[in-house]
Image: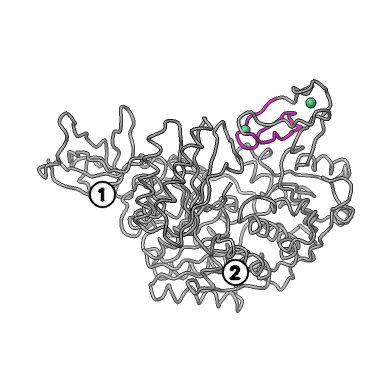
Amino acid sequence: MPTQILEIALPVPLAQNFSYRHRVQDDTDAGRLVLRGDLVVVPFGRRREVTGLVLTVGPEDDGVELPAGVKMRDVVRVLPPEYRVTGDRLRLAHWLADYYMLPLGEVVPLFHPPAPGTKARKVTAAADDWPEVDAEALQLTVAQTAALDAARSHLDEGKFGAVLLHGVTGSGKTEVYLALIAAALAQDRGAIFLLPEIALTPQTLARIHARFGDQVAAVHSGLSAGQRCRVHEGAARGEIRVVVGPRSALFAPVLNLGVIVVDEEHETSYKQDEKPRYHARHAALVRGREAGAVVMLGSATPDLESWANAVAGRFKLCSLPERLGGGALPPVEIVDMRGGDGADGLSPVLDQALDETLAAGRQTILFYNRRGFARVLQCRDCGEIRTCPHCDIALTYHLRPRRLLCHYCGYTRPVPEVCPDCGTGEFLTGGGGTEKLELLLQTRWPEARILRLDQDTTRRRDSHRRILSAFARGEADILVGTQMVAKGHHFPGVDLVGVLAADDGLGLPDHRSAERSFQLLTQVAGRAGRTGAGRVVFQTWRPDDPVIGAAAVHDYGAFVAGEMPTRQALGYPPARRLLRLAVTSRRKGDAEAVASELATALRDAFTRPGLSVLGPAPAVFPRLQDRHRFQLLVKGTLRRAERTWLTECLRRLKEARRGVDLIHDVDPVSIY
Ligand SMILES: [Zn+2]
Ligand SMILES: [Zn+2]
């Protein structure tokens, strides 16, 4: 039996590949002949096993030179051919490593399920309490047909193309996606349908499944390792032609890929906030290019970068300006909260609207983007605020159970009886939260049935889905919640949407805070009046803010006209690219020293016009989980040689100082 020498990329933070030996044993699957692109399990270090990607294969007598005393180790097993990374996926892997400045091995885990090769145990599907959905394709409107045709022209040519589908909530974007996927299937091409995790409701899945049957499979965090492997293998064999899921579904081995849909393309959850930090929308465009597929991005509030690409002609722009069935978008009333009493409560306008909606037997959604009872607990005498000992941020006061909680790191402690600083026993609570709002509603309308949807009520598995389906079935009158209530659900019974503090996100020190606020407000407002008359109330302390004004009239164009010049003037995306560099350490002095060393190195290296270096400065949250944080920003587009230099520079700095971590985040979605 021959022996092969394999050069393998491993998921370890080292800028090198590794050589292993493979003794071919034809009689076993795990010992078969290895090809380039295969995934193999190898020993690493003393007792770890890792999955790596085979880059090159050579016979043993090619003679890889090993330093004296180093023995080449053997491959443990070869994964089945379904796990091979080739073609458009292999090219995508190389692009990810290059663009995001990572060793190739560190992007390999994106291309296989967490435990590749696990056998799925047969599971019985849980009974679904969503209504049966109609499998029939609907008659498309003129605008929907135009969007479909724009995408189909790329599909028919078999060439890459991107389409931005800008459609108001309820305008029937999903019907366009499904028609496009059907067109791909008719040409024997496959499809990937990306959704934010939170929009992956049984409702959505049932609709897709009803249309395409067993050719479609979903991947999401609720699946077991074995189930994920079954989807992966089915796609690689061509049995599954459509894969639906959050950002990780982009890497599924769908054969002969023709269509990639990125729904709610503005969602920041498409950006992974841990290594490898990649943006699934950007990666989808690259995979589409490499596969010769059409990529359709859809949103009611497109990301400004996508919008700029459409304006520049890189994407085709298609609009669905009307709600299906001609229903108007609900009118939004802006209520000025300045000078009023009860800073956390309901204005008389919202109070009355709620009263009327309850009396009419219709439903209400109340959106308040803060959970807990009170944002801060402050001593009445000395004014000290209770903060997290690990994070330097205020602890949130929760009532049930009665605790103080850090929303960043999860640190929790009992509410003190007396102030630890001055010994007096009286506290003030400042700022409200969903928990307080729920109590207030219960007192005001004792008969009303109220559900609350936030991180505190959705800790248990499946509770998120149960709350939403109960509300959809009309088992509650009011749904109170954080931004979880804004996304991806269709509630025909909702007449009223109330936003408690519409200006909540606007003051954040982030170039995208206005954009995120606009998106959230537009989305939540779109929940009202999906059938019949709707009404929306924005309570705000900044009634004249143009972002709130634009969201109140559902005017994306007005928002863009106001925001784009600001980005241009300040040199933020989409005007210029951004790279965030964070230096963290338990020792403040170390973090600060390395940050300033890095700044000096960057300023020496990046002298050409078009690049600028900002910082270092303490991050907006200067200490989280006991780590001090300093930050730098690089504006501009780095060339390949500059990326290579920077990767090396970061590695060198990290090695020089123990306990210091350096994080580089290409195209960050937030900078705090
Ligand atoms: Zn005190
Ligand atoms: Zn904390």
Look at the numbered discs 1 and 2 and tell me whether their residues touch, using CB distance below 8 Å. Answer: no
Q: Secondary structure at mark 2?
A: strand
Instruction: Name the residue carrying label 1.
Output: 55
Instruction: Name the residue carrying label 2.
Output: 166
- Most frequent secondary structure within the magenta stretch: loop
- 611 relative position to 643: left or right: right
Residue 564: which numbered mark, if any? none
- 125 relative position to 107: left or right: right
Please determine whether, in this image, residue 428 is positioned above or below residue 306: above
Residue 347 image position (x, y, % from top left): 87, 52
Answer with the quarter of the image where residue 363 lies: bottom right
Crowd around label 1: few <14 · some 14–19 · many ≥20 (10 Å): some
Residue 336 visible? The answer is: yes
Residue 534 image position (x, y, % from top left): 79, 63
Please determine whether, in this image, residue 634 is positioned above or below residue 333: above
Q: Secondary structure at mark 1?
A: strand
Q: Per the image, is 56 magenta?
A: no
Query: In which quadrant of the rendered image does the N terminus lie?
Result: top left
Kind of residue indicated by mark 2: His
Q: Which residues are magenta?
A: 392-413
Of residue 91 and residue 579, the one placed in the foreground of this image is: 579
Kind of residue indicated by mark 1: Leu
* Residue extending farthest top: 423
Of residue 490 and residue 473, the one placed in the foreground of this image is: 490
Crowd around label 2: few <14 · some 14–19 · many ≥20 (10 Å): many
Residue 558 image position (x, y, % from top left): 68, 69
- Among the two numbered marks 1 and 2 on one chain, the one whose residue lies closer to the N terminus: 1
